[in-house]
Image (cartoon, rainbow, N blue to C red):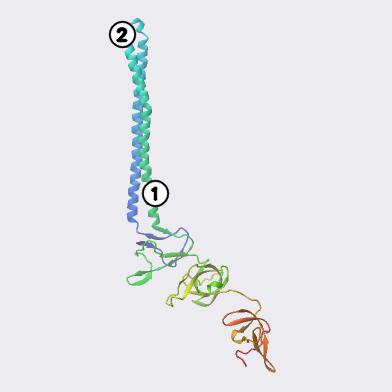
Amino acid sequence: MLVKLIPPGSHVKKGEVVAEFDRQYMLQRLDDYRASVAQLDANIQMLKADLAVAHEAHAQLVRVAKADQDKAMLDLKTIAVRSAIEAEKFKLNAEEAQAHYDQVLAETKLVEESQRAQLRAAEIDRDQARIELDRAQANADRMVIRAPIDGIAVMQSIWRKGDFGQVREGDQIWPGQFFMSIVDPSSMVLTAGVNQVDSEALRVGMKATIHVDAYPDLELPGALVGIAAMTTGGGWRANYVREVPLRLKLNSTDPRLLPDLSASADIIVQTEKQATLVPVAGIFHDTSKAGPFVFLQTPSGWMQKDVELGLTNHVQAAVRSGLSKGDVIALQRP
């Protein structure tokens, strides 16, 4: 659910918060993970202190065993002046002290390994809790939407209570639902479609003139930058009427230009410079003649004259030779 949303049409800067979803539950989980990490850090510090005490206690045992061994070795040096019973007793004490010292000294490595294992286990638990904390933080951050670029906020329409309306605070947005776009007004793109019959003549990079329906006097230059690989349906028209989606980039902008305005484009497929244009109705063909011809008006009447045609569309044809600007021709046979 959206709990924060900037007004439609707002100008935003890159990184600015434009929308925020309800994330109370995520923030509560985040606090729990943060407290868990803090508790595990404290437990590690306490464990380090306990291990330090245990390490020192074992070191003290080693020192005591070493002292007992040294004392037994000194007593062993006096057996020359001792009785046989005392000498045997000193030998047994020396052997026992040596064995005890060797045993305590050998346990030192085991004690250190055990302490390191306990500490590492505690650190693994702490690190795992930190990973969960980072994951919870990332999930909470994903619920705050920031503008990826400088631009204008454009709201989409959603179905609400039996009617379509612009997205607003309090609306529930489903996963993957498109609800807002940030548009860069200095780099606009026209999303259009062309009949499948005409799509074969189009190529990326072709120039175009874009007309905005809201401003009939506004014409902007553009270029064809994208042609879809698949067709789409013709809407309310018959199923066999298919369109190919196009994308045209505007090469210039205008202060009146806003996102989501309806527009159309004339794409220039081919051009001829300094062409003389005539209506296609004035071009005639005859099986007895090799090429096209026109009926040219002269002072003595209509005269049949051969012409060389250039580019031709459904309404006009370019005449490369045979006519001059200002000539009058017949649109039907005289």
Q: Is residue 215 above or below residue 92?
A: below
Residue 6 image position (x, y, % from top left): 41, 64
Looking at marks 1 and 2 on the same chain, the residue that comes earlier in the sequence is marked by: 2
What label does residue 26 carry, if any?
none
**Amino acid of disc 1:** Asp
Q: What residue would you read off at disc 2? A: 86
Q: Is residue 304 above or below residue 187?
A: below
- Looking at the image, which residue is at 38% across and 54% down? 139
What label does residue 134 carry, if any?
1
Residue 58 image position (x, y, % from top left): 34, 26
Location of residue 300 (image quadrant): bottom right
**Amino acid of disc 2:** Glu
Q: Is residue 214 left or right of residue 3?
A: right
Q: Is residue 305 above or below residue 123?
A: below
Disc 2 crowd rating (10 Å Cα; few below 14, some 14-19, many 20+) is: some
| Cα–Cα span, label 1 and label 2 | 71 Å
In the displayed orientation, state which residue is furthest to the front: 288
